[in-house]
Image (cartoon, grey):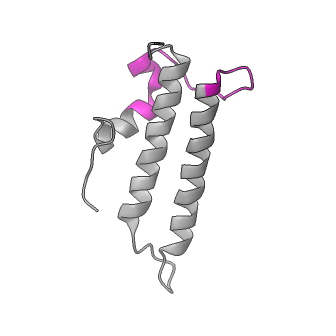
Amino acid sequence: MGAIELCGYTPEQLREYSHYPEKHFGQPHFLACYTDGPALLAVNKLRTVVRQTELAAYAAFRDADGNVTRGDMILGLNRLSSLMWIFMIKLKAGRYERK
């Protein structure tokens, strides 16, 4: 699997923006709470499914010696999880317009 962009973000941007959200979006890291809106909570649920899939891929794509055989798949899932986190950050920061 080659390098891809997700929603216009390069893999490097996904990592940078998800690790430093306050710098890029004015919103620090946070824990989702039941008082957050339904959209943010739905994205958080999706993010947890992506993370579970990443862990399953890590278990599935190893050889007999324990070496990862599909690091590209695992990295892709990790970046997808980062995208979900960015969506959550932007929702929390009010960066999406309501229509």
Examine the rendered structure and indicate whether residue 27 appears above or below residue 33: above
Q: In this image, 24 relative to 93: left or right?
A: left
> Who is closer to the viewer here, 69 or 42?
42
- In magenta segment, residue 19: yes
Q: Position of residue 82 (x, y in %)?
A: 46, 40
Examine the rendered structure and indicate whether residue 80 appears above or below residue 36: below
Q: In this image, 67 relative to 32: left or right?
A: left
Magenta extent: 17-38
Determine the residue located farthest toward the bottom in the rendered image.
64
> Who is closer to the viewer here, 85 or 99?
99
Q: Position of residue 6 (x, y in %)?
A: 33, 41
Image point (55%, 58%), residue name: 53
Q: Position of residue 12 (x, y in %)?
A: 31, 41
Q: Position of residue 4 (x, y in %)?
A: 27, 49
> Who is closer to the viewer here, 28 or 52?
52
Image point (56%, 43%), residue name: 47
Q: In this image, 85 relative to 12: left or right?
A: right
Q: In this image, 61 relative to 4: left or right?
A: right
Determine the residue located farthest toward the front in the rendered image.
99
Image point (49%, 45%), residue name: 81
- Quarter holding the N terminus? bottom left
Quarter of image, res 72: bottom left
Examine the rendered structure and indicate whether residue 18 appears above or below residue 28: below
Determine the residue located farthest toward the right in the rendered image.
34
What is the count of numbered marks? 0
- In magenta segment, residue 31: yes
Examine the rendered structure and indicate whether residue 25 appears above or below residue 58: above
> Who is closer to the viewer here, 30 or 88?
88
